[in-house]
Amino acid sequence: MIIIILGAPGVGKGSYARILQEKLNIPHISTGDILRKAINDGTPLGEKVKSFVSKGELVPDDIMLEVVRQRISEPDARNGFILDGFPRTIIQAEGLKKLLEKMGKSVDYIINMILDDETIVKRLSSRRQCPHCGAIYNMLSNPPQNDELCDICGEKVIIRPDDQPDTVRFRLKVYNEKTKPLIEYYEKEKGYIIFNTSPSIEVGTKALLEKLGI
Ligand code: ADP
Ligand code: ZN
């Protein structure tokens, strides 16, 4: 199964993608996580993208398309994958379509995750992420059990540098200008689903799995 998750920064794409990954046994491919790892590891890709990511700007489409082409060609993505954070522009969406056509594949679901702006800003300011394994926490609603240490790997969780309030506002602006037009692009496709992430993760998960028929 191939799933695309759309939605503004902070709506909960990553949290739900991780749940779907477990349920469906297909990889969660977060382009943000891939870029952050490349930056941390100091790879050539990391060097190329770090100034864009730290400012909350979009990384150029050709770089992103190549990143995704490589990742979805890996063996673990053979039976499907969940794309989180990609596509983010019409050009990326068209590039993805061509890529999938070449591979003889097509998208099954496009989940448009929605949430009001006020809650988004609140969630992002209390969001923490494990720099080692990528696990996501929220200090208000879902803190790590042991102080500020990751439940999974024990590393100290951190505030993502691009979760500072000014950068969050800028990322929301970028989303509205560049990524929102994708909703019009996808909404007439079969498999398009709108999903409101305001309930708790437990309630939301039930509703989402029902919508997907799993
Ligand atoms: P968000 O919480 O904003 O959804 P992500 O973790 O998906 O954040 O992405 C973090 C940053 O990585 C973005 O602000 C952008 O700089 C870069 N990025 C991730 N995916 C893409 C993409 N598909 N196209 C361009 N830039 C991207
Ligand atoms: Zn961890």
Image: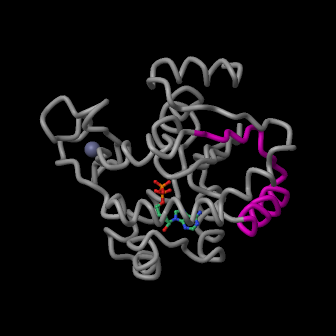
- The reply, left or right, for residue 141 in relation to residue 60 is left
Q: In which quarter of the image is the N terminus?
A: top right
* Residue 9 or residue 102, whichever sits in front: 9
Residue 75 coordinates in the image, percent (x, y): 60, 50
- The reply, left or right, for residue 144 in relation to residue 190 is left
Report which quarter residue 15 is drawn in: top left
Q: Where 41 sits versus 133, above or below?
A: below
The residue located at (59%, 29%) in the rendering is 24
Report which quarter residue 54 is drawn in: bottom left
- The reply, left or right, for residue 145 in relation to residue 71 is left
* Extreme residue toward the left, this view: 147
- Tally of numbered discs: 0
Q: Quadrant of the C terminus?
A: top right
Q: Where 141 sits versus 97, above or below?
A: above
- The reply, left or right, for residue 169 in relation to residue 80 is left
Residue 116 coordinates in the image, percent (x, y): 53, 41
Q: Where 212 sits versus 79, above or below?
A: above
The residue located at (39%, 76%) in the rendering is 43
Q: Where 124 sits versus 163, above or below?
A: above
Does residue 111 show up magenta in the picture? Answer: yes
Residue 198 coordinates in the image, percent (x, y): 50, 30
The residue located at (23%, 53%) in the rendering is 158
The residue stretch that appears in magenta: 90-114
Residue 33 coordinates in the image, percent (x, y): 44, 57
Does residue 135 show up magenta in the picture? Answer: no
The residue located at (38%, 42%) in the rendering is 123
